[in-house]
Image (spheres, grey):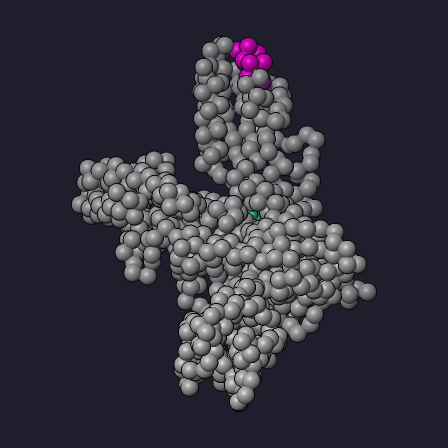
Amino acid sequence: MRYLQSYFNELWKFFVSVKLSISLLLSLAATSIIGTVIPQNKNPAEYVKAFGDFFYRLFDVFDFFDMYQSWWFQMLIILLLINIIVCSIDRLSKTWKITFVKNPKFNVSRFRTLSNKEEFIKDGAPEQLKSIYETIVSKGFGYSRTEDTEKGFCIFAEKWRWTRLGVYVVHLSIILLLIGAVIGSNFGFDGFVNIPEGKGVKSVRISNSAETHPLDFEIRCDDFNVTFYESGAPKEFRSSLTILENSKPVLQKNIIVNDPLRYKGINIFQSSYGPLPPEEVTLKFTIKESGISYVKKLLIGQQISIPEGLGTFVLKGFTKSAAFRGHAIGESFIGVIEPANGKSNEIMLPLRFPSFDDMRKGDVLVSVEGYKEKYYTGLQVTKDPGVWVVYAGFIFMIIGCFITFFISHQRICVEAVKSGNKTKVMIAGTSNKNKLGMESVIARIIKRLNR
Amino acid sequence: MNSSNLLSIITFVYGLAAFLYIASLVFKRSLPGKLASVVLLTGAIGNAAGIILRWQESYKLGIGHAPLSNLYESLVFFALTIAVFYLIIERKYKNRIIGSFIAPLAFLTMAYASLSPNISDQIQPLLPALKSNWLIAHVIACFIGYSAFALAFGISLVYLIKQNRKEDSDSILGRLPSVNVLNELNYQLIMFGFLFLTVGIITGAVWANSAWGRYWGWDPKETWSLITWFVYATLLHARMMRGWDGKRIAYLSIVGFMAVLFTYFGVNYLPGLHSYGSQ
Ligand code: HEM
């Protein structure tokens, strides 16, 4: 038992030291650099290519490819957390006592030795000044108390004693941030999904992993639109989404970047988009002999008969990058013509070259009149129940930093001593930080007292 | 005249101010120093006017947005905050010597923005992800913080130079503020900068959460801002709790500002993508 006790004391001493926090903060700063130089969570093959086999294995041992989730980085953070908690408990027990006293102790002789001290002589006896001085001093300070002395009186006053606790608010905020992050990573997820226009999904892929995460509702993309600036950069992308529960629509919203849809604690963000191969195309068949053009709408896979009895046409599909005799001709539809008599013939209908089919010199010329562009919408789907804890941490941190840096616990003492038929007045003040600011506080009070 | 022209002129105004501050320091005359203050103030007013003008221009182009959306615009804003901060400190401490170290920073920032071939001064339309009020708060807070750190950096340099030489009231160094004042000023500026850096990181996180559904993603820019934050947190604790002396604090302040610069410029040369700031 004794043994355990001393063991505990040693541990406590280790964690109570500010040297430890300084070392930890610097280690975190230094090691964090690694993950910014080595791109994180990429394919092993890419790493091998970039670093070679040996360094790939070495870095892999140290988790450098996913370092912010690695055991040693998390260990540093946990040590920091224990450090803050232990330090704060250790200190707080003392600070708490001096912060919440009913009657703060003042020591006149202490004030007399301060460098931040002024003296002047005033007409009249101390008794005449007493009540005037009391009102002046108590106006500027939250707490004030007058004590009679042998040859006069002494006023003590102070304010903003509680700001000594500001630093614990900051440290608490860091604890909140970490708790929020732990909640988020254990009970939340971060996924993405691509939904073609008109389709719906019931699960999403988890980022940086092969897993999928089922949803207990369906997300359907009814429509997707993208607009562009003149420069060609995207201006806005917008998805019309419907949430369905048991195939019944329950919520409809258009989302754009920075304006997500939230449903049942799950956030759905517009994140990217991309083209889908078109499914429907309008083709023009120009018959060479008669010179008449016929316009037809076709779906992929559909077969129609060519007008004027020239056979049949099947729309086979669409390809993003077609090639013809070694030349790239870009996005093209592909079809097959079966003439009434003769060999069947595969033809390309590139979007960029409408009269491409001329070259074939067949008796019917096929060209693309138009097609409906289709997109898929890329959605980021996340859930983070810890986010409110993190946000509370954010608020505490800002408030705490402000208090800690810019508001100080100020104490002053005004001593009046009878000196003949006049009074000798001494004013001295101290604060726990910002000594320069305290000087101007004293200067202002003197101005009022010495009027 | 459009805003880019005006801002190019301001580059030279800042250059002139820097020249005058240095002349005043080297030739030990107060007249160029007084002139320098006036020139720097003129530059700051012109700089602010340029930002406002640019804001209006963007609306005339039909793509109106606050002029804080790319590297050029953020540099211009950075130069303004440096100049304004310095002028406030000059008034408060009634000492122009530090200006010789700070005015060149404002000049270099503007010169880099105006003259670097890699930085476009075109008014560009906003990408969808950048359309957020959080982003505006984020940029303003970060750059106020950065300028406080820039000033602390200048003051730390002065401190180290002064520390390493003997006192001699007639020399240039003798007329610098005392090491105690420099030390205190350094500390005050870092506390100020730290608060704004904190607000900057937090507003950035809130923005990321509203745009991508995550408040933190360890992307290099985020990580480097956190590294910067760690360095200054170390500095604050070292000074508050361990009573580190001015010299070590000055070195840490310089390291911190290097981290700021890397967060701002260096990150663009790292692998990875942060949609903001790369151009
Ligand atoms: C980054 C995480 C941080 C860690 C690990 C940390 C850790 C610590 C530790 C271990 C102490 C000594 C505890 C004590 O004796 O009371 C301390 C003290 C202190 N910290 Fe922090 N801190 C952090 C962030 C901050 C921040 C952001 C501020 C800024 C407001 C701050 C302000 C202070 C102050 C003012 C003290 C002195 C407390 C006193 O006088 O009792 N800390 N910190």
Q: Residue at x 68, y 42 (%)?
A: A96
Q: Tell me where the magenta segment starts and ends, as one range.
A: A125-134
Residue A303 in view (yes/no): yes
Q: Quadrant of residue B93?
A: top left
In the picture provided, is B177 more to the left or to the right than B145? left
Q: Quadrant of the C terminus of chain A?
A: top left
**Where residue A123 sits: x, y (%)?**
47, 11
In the image, farthest residue toward the bottom: A343
Q: Residue at x 41, y 78 (%)?
A: A358
In the picture provided, is A88 more to the left or to the right than A133? right
A215 vs A135, nearest the viewer: A215
**Where residue B138 sits: x, y (%)?**
50, 48
**Where residue A84 sits: x, y (%)?**
64, 55
B58 vs A231, nearest the viewer: A231
Q: Residue at x 55, y 56 (%)?
A: A225
In the picture provided, is A87 more to the left or to the right than A49? right
B17 vs B269, nearest the viewer: B269
In the picture provided, is A206 more to the left or to the right than A231? right
In the image, farthest residue toward the right: A1
Residue B40 in view (yes/no): no
Q: Residue at x 57, y 60 (%)?
A: A271
Q: Is residue A127 magenta?
A: yes
As drawn, B89 above or below B235 = above
Q: Quadrant of residue A103?
A: top right
Q: Main secondary structure of the magenta part?
A: helix
Q: Is residue A27 magenta?
A: no
A324 vs A35, nearest the viewer: A324
Q: Quadrant of the N terminus of chain A?
A: bottom right
Q: Quadrant of residue B39?
A: top left
Q: How many labels sit on residues? A: 0
**Where residue B225 sits: x, y (%)?**
49, 57
